[in-house]
Amino acid sequence: MKKEVRIFFTALMFFTRIPVPKGIDHNTADLNRSSRYFPMVGIIVGIIGAACFAAAHSLFKDIFTAVILSLIATLLVTGAFHEDGLADVADGFGGGWTKQRILEIMKDSRTGAFGVVALIVVLLLKICLLAKLALLMINTHLLAFCLLYIAAHAFSRTMPVFFLRYMQYAREDDATAKSKPLATKISLPGLLVALVTGLIPLLLLTYALHYSYLLLLVVLPCGLLTLYLARFFLKWINGYTGDCLGATQQLNEITFYMGILAIWNYI
């Protein structure tokens, strides 16, 4: 049990800026095993974002202000880790036409036009979608909206874990890549742990909305998106990188919100 707790805190330290107990470091062996706890990290990030939304809405009585402040909170707590991956993927695949060139661009610390546009579009989409969902739910389903926020962060972090199981790392010759320690293939039990953990908030959301099981259909567009991204990455770079994992999380989070908004009309 102590070993699993240490591995969880390793994941929390790697993907967020939340303080962890002393003695937790970037141990390669623990990082290799930490992928099973990605959705758990998402739950914590989602709780922070949801709590910030609830507090801001209670204080300012304005949905857009609350949504923006909650997004700022999640960006601060994660250090915009996944957003950085999205920007790098947009730059790499937008400006590169060969595997080598794409990987070179993604490794560049500078953000180009494609990356900036991708970040602007994704952040604006998050604000609009969350504000619309909050407008629909806030008066009668505040708890459900908070669960929605948590579920989106948890489930969107489940989808990249499938890459760790079924795809290979694209930078096999690059020991300095920021996600290289995570390139080890996750075990099937580890994948199942991540999948169950990522689904728990969504199941709680269906319960909070009086067993609205139609909400579970949101896994379909997320699954299709992840399958498409896997094929796309395999075609161009023959695998994935840490930036690909971050981009997959961000796009799945957007897809999750869009899916829930579409399903909401039928429940």
Image (cartoon, helix red, strand yellow):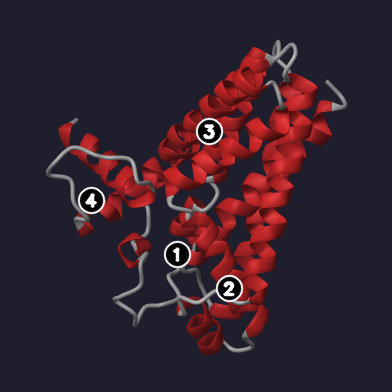
At numbered mark 3, what does the secondary structure look like: helix, strand or loop? Answer: helix
Determine contact: label 4, label 1, CB under 8 Å. Answer: no
Q: Which residue is mark 2?
A: 234
Mark 1, secondary structure of its residue: helix
Give the x, y percent position of residue 15.
38, 50
Q: Which mark is residue 30?
A: 4
Q: CA distance from mark 2 to mark 3?
A: 33 Å
Give the distance between the C-alpha atoms of the residues marked 2 and 4, in whole angstroms: 27 Å
Q: Could you tell me which quadrant the C terminus lies in?
A: top right
Q: Earlier in the sequence, mark 3 or mark 1?
A: 3
Indicate the amino acid at tag 3: Gly
Q: CA distance from mark 3 to mark 4?
A: 27 Å
**Lower position in the chain sequence, tag 1 or tag 2:** 2
The answer to whether the residue labelled 3 contacts the one labelled 1, judged by CB atoms less than 8 Å apart, is no
Q: Position of residue 207 (x, y in %)?
A: 63, 14
Comparing 260 with 238, the one in front is 260
Tell which of 13 and 211 is nearer to you: 13
Counting residues from the start of the chain, the first of labels 4 and 1 encountered is 4
* Quadrant including the N terminus: top left
- Provide the residue designation for mark 1: 242
Q: Position of residue 146 (x, y in %)?
A: 60, 24
Which label was assigned to residue 252?
none
Q: Residues within 10 Å of mark 4 (few under 14, many from 20)?
A: many
Q: Amino acid at mark 1?
A: Gly
Q: Amino acid at mark 2?
A: Leu
Label 2 crowding class (10 Å Cα cut-off): few <14, some 14-19, many 20+? some
Q: CA distance from mark 4 to mark 1?
A: 17 Å
Could you say where residue 198 lies in the image, as x and y percent from the top left? Answer: 51, 35
Q: Residue at x 51, y 58 (%)?
A: 246
Say which residue label 3 marks: 49
